[in-house]
Amino acid sequence: MAGAGAVRAIRDRIKSVQSTAQVTRAMELVAASKMRRAQDRAVQARPYADRMRSVLLQLAGYAQSVDPDELSPLLQEREVKHFAFIHITADRGLAGGLNANMNRMGASLALEHQPNVERVSVLPVGRKGRDFFRRSGFPMLAEFTGLGDFPESSEVLPIARIIRDDFIAGNIDQVYIGYQRFVNAAVQRPTVRQILPIQPPEDATATEEDDGRRPVDFIFEPSPESLLETLLPRYIEMQIYEAVLEARASEQSARMVAMRQATDAANDMVSDLTLTYNKARQESVTSELLDIIGGTAALENA
Amino acid sequence: MPLRLSIVTQDRTVLEQDDVTRLVVPTTEGQITILPSHAPLMASLSIGEMVVYTPAGPDPIAVHGGFIQVVDDEVSVLADAAERASDIDETRADEARTRAERHLTERAADTGEAIDLLRAQAALQRSLLRLRVVRRRRGTGVPASR
């Protein structure tokens, strides 16, 4: 009977949407807990980053008094012939517009620099960005995928190593990093920063703290220049690690929100379908009743 | 006035301690001891054992390179890696040492890749340091450094 068939079709549909809702709900919960852990890791990395910035700021003050040609090459600006950028995305999708937004920003960064330099290359971190740039035809310095949800700083070191070596060798003249900055659980912002040549950190917190008692008369062991030489590579590592941690926290929060919306949409659909289902069932029951009544009436009349 | 010490790595804060009476640190220029009212100092760290003295007793820590800053009795250690004795697994460290030593003797025979040799040496150095730190904590023998 057509009526009963339609009713069953709707019931199957409801079941399938319900199980989708269960899956997206589970993914939302997983993303929520991963987001908290990713955020924790970002918070735990902060003391090192803060101290590193303040130390570097103080050291840079001493090093500036030296002849600029003797400065570490990592600090020296030069004409940009080869521009490169580290492009951080997630390995997996189902995170709303997160990766698409990041890729769009990466593409516009590349296109913006292209007319002014001889070469623009990219170092993608994350599968979504790698797949995107593989199609774009920009050369890749290297690619990093499968870093996992909670990468350790040691896993990020090779990235820093590659760009540092290439920069010192003169293969690249300027390096930016692009990532999704974690603003809060609902907001992620595509952000671009310069990594090389190193720009000394901003003076924001240090000035208030050090006002009046700067310059401090430090003992340097061995010398300010060689200390700077050991700190600068670590500063690059720290910045990249920081960006990766932010990007991971952003990924989880974007996924959490996307999955919550999917769950809500599925639940809405279930209630719509349930309404349709009840109506259809009622109609089929009514028509069956009418059939029976009609049938009995026909028998009685006979 | 005691020293306020914080040891941080890129991944986490390893130690925060504000009642440090004395601090022995391995710098690239040699081992130094920091007492309260130390002159402002910036130094790079080598791989070695750092010992934090508090009223509760000495706390040995394995430090794998990095940087130290001392200003106004505030000591910041930015370590590439740092482990407290309680975080070190002695059995694993011992196994790592045996493994590294075996690698080194095997490599000594054939010509060996220079990088492998360096890696094995670094691994040996790390495992010896961990053993030294964890054994000092326990008060048993300190293996001779080589």
Image (spheres, rainbow, N blue to C red):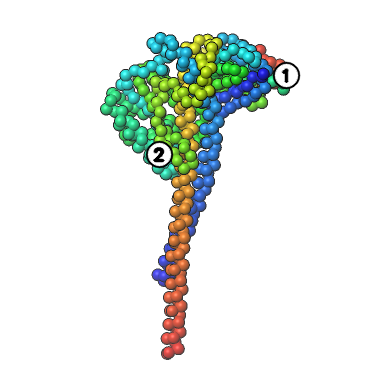
Residue placed furthest toward the left: A115
- Sort mark 2 into few (<14), some (14-19) or many (20+) by Cα contacts within 10 Å: many
Q: Is residue B88 visible?
A: no
Label 1 amino acid? Answer: Gly
Eye-nearest disc, 2 or 1: 2
Q: Quadrant of residue A292?
A: bottom left
**Nearest the camera: A109 or A122?**
A109
* Quarter containing the N terminus of chain A: bottom left
Instruction: Provide the chain ID for the residue under circle 2.
Output: A
**In the structure shown, which secondary structural element does the residue marked by tag 2 occupy?**
helix
Question: What's the mark number on residue B139?
Answer: 1
Going by the numbered disc 2, the residue's amino acid type is Asn
* Chain letter of the residue carrying label 1: B
Horizontally, residue B70 falls left or right of residue A125, namely right
- Residue B93 screen position, x and y as percent: 63, 22
Residue A154: x and y, percent? 51, 26
SS at badge 1: loop
Counting from the top left corner in percent of width and height, residue B99 is at: 59, 20
From the image, tell me which residue sits under label 2: A99
Which residue is pictured at 44% across the width and 59% down the height? A13
Q: In the rendered view, does A207 fall on the left or right side of A194?
A: right
